Amino acid sequence: MHYGNPYIEICVEGSSSIFKGLNQKDKELIDQHHIVSIYRKGELIISEGDKPKGFMCLASGKVKTFRVGVGGREQILNMVRQNGFLCYRVLFSDNPQPFSAMALEDSAVVIFEKNCLLKILKRNAELTFKFMKVMSEDLLFINNRLVSLTQKHVRGRIAETLLILRDTYGLEADGKTIRVMLPREDIAHLSNMTTSNAIRTLSNLSSERVIEMDKRRIKILDSNRLEHISELG
């Protein structure tokens, strides 16, 4: 079918989209009940405590979700890739947003109208099951990360963070360079440690030839060793 804009088409027809199997009528309904918002690098998409605008799908770009804790310290909760969801909880709860989200690069977000999507979910058991699967996988990830961030040593946490970035965003054509560039501060916030600890640990991994760093670009030279360090914790 012909969509009103390319961003809604990405969210509905993308290879990893859970909406791909919808019938023509439901796709047309979604196409008629959405808006697209464009965000520049560093711009807030969601602020913690905001009232949800609707169900959000990341059509292009990269996004981090985070909370600010005691003393203004940031903890990154997750990294979102294309076709990822920013606030699916809005479909089942009217609670305020539990986190903030920021664009790591210029990004486009499709906001689905809540009532429209709920109408489709109520009559489409297969789509509802797909949503449940996404939520279950998200909960499993959060539970595993909680254990890792509280029990692993700094080397294990940094190694796991680099593997998460690799698995989330993939690698460049060389098969080694992670396809996202983050400041050391963000790597620290994703690993639940101070920036100085993150810089020191990354430098140690670099000197051991496990990774290679070129400013914000990180190349994984020995993925087996990195996975081993992550597992040892």
Image (cartoon, rainbow, N blue to C red):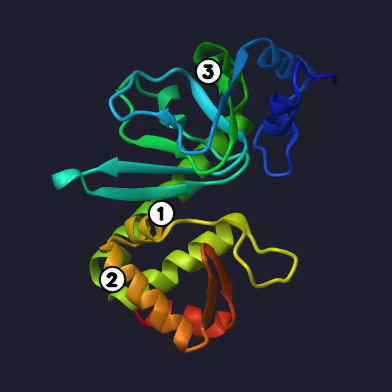
Q: What amino acid is found at the position of numbered circle 1 in the picture?
A: Leu
Under tag 1, what secondary structure? helix
**Outermost residue to the right:** 1
Q: Quadrant of the rendered structure where residue 231 is?
A: bottom left
Q: Is residue 46 above or below residue 184?
A: above
Name the residue: 68% across, 44% down.
Answer: 16
Q: What amino acid is found at the position of numbered circle 2 in the picture?
A: Asn
Q: What amino acid is found at the position of numbered circle 3 in the picture?
A: Leu
Q: Is residue 67 above or below residue 207?
A: above
Name the residue: 40% across, 28% down.
Answer: 46
Circle on res. 118: 3
Q: Residues within 10 Å of mark 2 (few under 14, many from 20)?
A: some
- Residue assigned mark 2: 197
Sequence order check, earlier mark of 2 and 3: 3
Under tag 2, what secondary structure? helix
Q: Residues within 10 Å of mark 1 (few under 14, many from 20)?
A: few
Q: Quadrant of the rendered structure where residue 120 is?
A: top right
146 or 190, nearer to the observer: 190
Name the residue: 74% across, 43% down.
Answer: 15
Q: Nearer the viewer, mark 2 or mark 1?
A: 2
Under tag 3, what secondary structure? helix
Name the residue: 60% across, 55% down.
Answer: 169
Q: Residues within 10 Å of mark 3 (few under 14, many from 20)?
A: some
Number of marks in picture: 3
Q: Is residue 64 above or below residue 208?
A: above
**Outermost residue to the left:** 71
Circle on res. 140: 1
47 or 206, nearer to the observer: 206
Sequence order check, earlier mark of 2 and 1: 1
Quote the CA–CA distance across marks 2 and 3. 45 Å
Q: Quadrant of the rendered structure where residue 130 is?
A: top right
Quote the CA–CA distance across marks 2 and 1. 27 Å
